Image: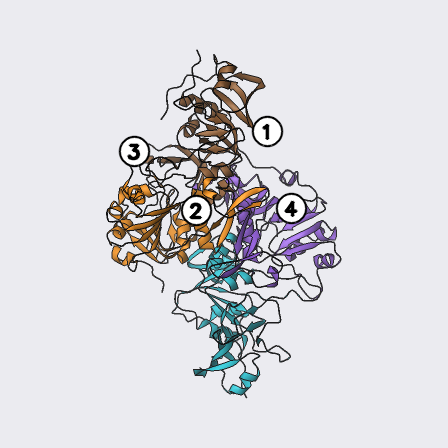
Chain colours: A brown, B cyan, C orange, D purple
Amino acid sequence: MATPLTRDQMAWRAAQDLPDGAYVNLGLGMPVLAANYAPGDREIFYHSENGILGVGPVAQGAEIDPELVDAGSQRVTLRDGASVFDSAASFAMIRGGHIDITILGGFQVAGNGDLANWDAKVPNKGPLIGGAMDLAAGAKAVHVIMRHSTRDGGARLVTTCSYPLTAPACVKRVYTDLAVLDVDVGLAGGSFVAREIIPGLSREELTAATGAPLIFAPDCRELVAPELAEGT
Amino acid sequence: MATPLTRDQMAWRAAQDLPDGAYVNLGLGMPVLAANYAPGDREIFYHSENGILGVGPVAQGAEIDPELVDAGSQRVTLRDGASVFDSAASFAMIRGGHIDITILGGFQVAGNGDLANWDAKVPNKGPLIGGAMDLAAGAKAVHVIMRHSTRDGGARLVTTCSYPLTAPACVKRVYTDLAVLDVDVGLAGGSFVAREIIPGLSREELTAATGAPLIFAPDCRELVAPELAEGT
Amino acid sequence: MIDKRVDDLQAALAGIGPGASIMISGFGNAGIPGNLLHGLSGMGLSGLTMILNAIRRLEESNPVFFAEGQIAHVITTAFRGPGQAPAAFERQWQDGKLTFEIVPQGTFAERIRAGGAGVPAFYTPTAAGTPLAEGREQRDFNDQTCVLETALTADVALLRAEKADRYGNLFFRGTQSNFGAAMATAARLTIVEVEEISDQTLPPAQVHLPGIYVQRVLQAARKD
Amino acid sequence: MIDKRVDDLQAALAGIGPGASIMISGFGNAGIPGNLLHGLSGMGLSGLTMILNAIRRLEESNPVFFAEGQIAHVITTAFRGPGQAPAAFERQWQDGKLTFEIVPQGTFAERIRAGGAGVPAFYTPTAAGTPLAEGREQRDFNDQTCVLETALTADVALLRAEKADRYGNLFFRGTQSNFGAAMATAARLTIVEVEEISDQTLPPAQVHLPGIYVQRVLQAARKD
C-alpha cells in the first residue's frame, strides 16, 4: 500500500530542484515550506513580492520588526546580500522575467501547462488574486505543488481546467503527493510525463488518478522522501 | 533707441517668475543662467534630467566629483534636501507632470503654443533631441527664453512653426530680448499677449518683429532689467 | 521656504471630501498609515473610492468605514474577507452598495507607477488568457498575448514612512515602502505619517522618495 | 555559492560576438564604463547595435569603433557630432554604412525600463504631434494624443558603478546610475566595472541595484 507524501515531503522534493544561485519566489502555503528543505550547500535568494530579494529566516526576539515582513505577512529577517525595494520595483523583477523559479500552489494544472490557483467562486466571498497571475506569467519557470487529487477523489491534473485560469501554458513541473510530473506540450493538447512515482503505487493507479494523458519517462524513478516532522 | 536685453537679462527676467517652493528644470544655454538670478528669498529645487532633484552650485576644488554632473555635463554640487536617482525615475518625474516649470530654449514658438527647439536639418549632421520633448510634453508649465528675431531679422514668434516641433501647444510664456509674452490660445489659431516691453521700443516695432497676431495686455508694463555681467 | 510639516491629524487630512479617491499604502502590517486611516474614518465621508492591496485589513483595523457605508468603490488585489461568513464589505457588495475592481497585484503596482510616470496605458501578459481579460482589449507582442491596462491615479495617497524632513523627503524602514512609494507619485495630494520628523535634512543617500511627491508630513507613533 | 566577480577584462567581455546589441550607460562623464568600452572596441567585432544616450562621446573616447566600421546601428537621443564638420559616425550614416533611430531621452529611458519590467509596449504623449510620430501608431487617452512605444532590450549591458559585492549588488556614486540601472534590467548579460569590489557584502541600505540584474563584476579604476 503506497503512502502519499506529506505536505512537508512534497515541499522537500520541490526544494531539491532549486539550483545553486537561483532566485526563487515561493507562494503561500506548501510552497513556502520548501525554503526549509533546500540543500544547505546551495545559495538561494528567496524573493518576496512585497519587496525583498534575499528573505532570511523568520525573525525571533529582538530581530522582530513589524515593518519588515514577507509576502505572507510573516516578520522576517534578511539574508547576507539581501536588498529591499518597493512593490513596483518588485513586480518589475517578477514580470520582467528575472525570477528563475516560482513555486506556486494549485487547484488544477492542465496538460498544456494551464494553471488554476485562484477562485472567484467561493459563495458570498469576493475574489482573491494577489501576485499569482504576475508570478505565473512572469517567472522563467513555474513549478506547482499540490495534492494529486481533490478530497473527493477528483483529478487535479486535467485536460482542461474547470476553475478560472491564473495563466495559460505556464507550468513546467508539478509535485504531488504521488509523483513528480513534467508538462509536455509536444503532444496534441498536452500531456504529463511522470518522472518519479512514490513506492508502492502502480503506474496504472497513477494513470487512473490523473485526468489527462499521462506517459512515463523512460528513466522514471522512485520518489523517496525522508521522514519529516510537519513544519509550520 | 531701445536696447535689447542681454542673455543674462533675459534669464534674469525668467527667473523672477519662479515661485518659492517650485520644482524647476532648466534647459541648456540661456535657461540654465536663470539659476543665478532667482530671488534669494525663494527656495527653488532645480531638477536635472540625468537624475538630480536639488542641483546646487557648480563644484569647486575638492567638491569636484566627476561622477556627479548635471544635464549639461557640468560637475555640480547638491543643495540641502537634494536627492539623486536614475534616468528612468528622473524622466518619470518629468513625464508624470511633477515638474512645476521648465524653461527651455527655442527656435520658434507659435501663437497656439507649439514649440520648435530641435532641428534635424543641419546639413550633414544627425539629429539631437535629448530631453526636450519629454520636458515640453510633461512639465506643468513650459516657459521659453529666446531672441525675438533670427539673426537675419526673421520672426521667431510665428503663426505656424516651420521647424520640426518639439511638442504641440505646450508653451505658456516666452521671454525674449524685447518683451515678455504669454500664449493665448483663446483666439482662433492662437496669439501672443505682450505683458512687458523694453523701454524705448514702440508697440508698432514689437508688432512688426512678431510673426503672429499680437495684442497688448491692458496692464502691459515696461520690462526693466538690471545691469548684469555676462555669466557663464 | 518649503515646509511640508503639519501639526496635527486635522491639518494633515484637511480638504479631503466626499467622493474622493484614496490610495492607501501597506502590505501586511508594514507601511500602514494607521493614524491617517483612523482620522479619515472619523470624518464621516461618503462615496469614497479606496485603492489598496487588500481590503480585509482595512475592515479589521477601521470597521467604521464599513459600519457607516462610507466606501462606494474598491480597487484591490484581494477582495475577500477572513473566515467562512462574508465580511461586512462582502455583504455590502452583495447588497449592491459597494462595487469593486480586482487587479493582479503586479498590474496593480504597475498601473499606479504608470499613473505617476505619465504613462496613460501599457500592455502586459499578466491576466491574458484568464477571466480577468474577458471583454478587454488584447494584442500580441512577440507572440505573447497581452492585455491593455490603464494608469491609476487618485485624489489622495496616504502613506507611512520612518523619517521625513521639512522638504517631504522620505526614508522607509524594512518593507515599509511597498505600494506607498508609487502611490505618492500617482496622487494629487500625498499625506505621510512618520515615526520621526528630523530637524536635520535627510542626506541624499537616505532619501527613498524625493519630497516633490509629498505635500504633507505628520509625526505620529505607529498605530496598527 | 554565488560569485559574480571576474578577474580581468577578457573574462568580463567573454562571449560577446558580432552582431550583438549592446546598451551602454553614461551621461556626461558619469557612469561611463570606460574600461569595458576600451576592451570591447579592441575585439574587432562587426555589426554591433549600440544603445546609448549620446553617440558623440563614444567616438571621442573610442574612435576605433568607427575607424573600423564596427557599428551597424545606433539607438540614441543625440546623433550629432561636435563641431562643424560631420563626425565619423555621421559620414558612415551618409554613406549608408550605419543606421540610427533617434528617441526622446525620456522615452529612451522608459523603453529600457519597460524592457526590464516585462512591459512590451506603452503609450506616451512625448513626441506626439512631432515628426518623430509620423507613420507611428497614435491614440488618444484623456484627450491627449499619445504614441505607442515598444520596449528596448539588448544582448549585453555595460555599466560603471562605485562598489559591488560577490552577489553583483551595486552601489552607485553621484549621478552614476543614470541609464545603467534600467539597462541592467533589460539586457540578458549585464557586465559592470566598479571602483571597488568589497569583501564585505553591501548592506541592504547601500544596494542601489540588486545583484539579480548583474552577471559579472570587474574591478577597474575609472577610465574616461
* Mark 2 chain: C
Quote the CA–CA distance across marks 3 and 4: 55 Å
In depth, the one of A144 and A35 nearer the eye is A144
Q: Which residue is mark 3?
A: C84
Q: Looking at the rendered structure, which numbered label has been put on residue D21?
A: 4
Residue found at x 28% / y 39%: C87
Q: Is residue A123 above or below residue D68?
A: above
Q: Amino acid at mark 2?
A: Ala
Q: Nearer the viewer, mark 1 or mark 3?
A: 1
> Which quadrant would the C terminus of chain A be assigned to in this image?
top left
User: Are labels 3 and 2 assigned to the same chain?
Assistant: yes
Element type where label 3 sits in the image: loop
* Mark 1 chain: A
Quote the CA–CA distance across marks 1 and 3: 41 Å
Q: Which residue is mark 2?
A: C109
Element type where label 2 sits in the image: helix
Quote the CA–CA distance across marks 4 and 1: 37 Å
Disc with the residue nearer the chain's start (3 vs 2): 3
Q: Looking at the rendered structure, which numbered label has been put on residue C165?
A: none
Q: Residue D33: x and y, percent?
A: 60, 48
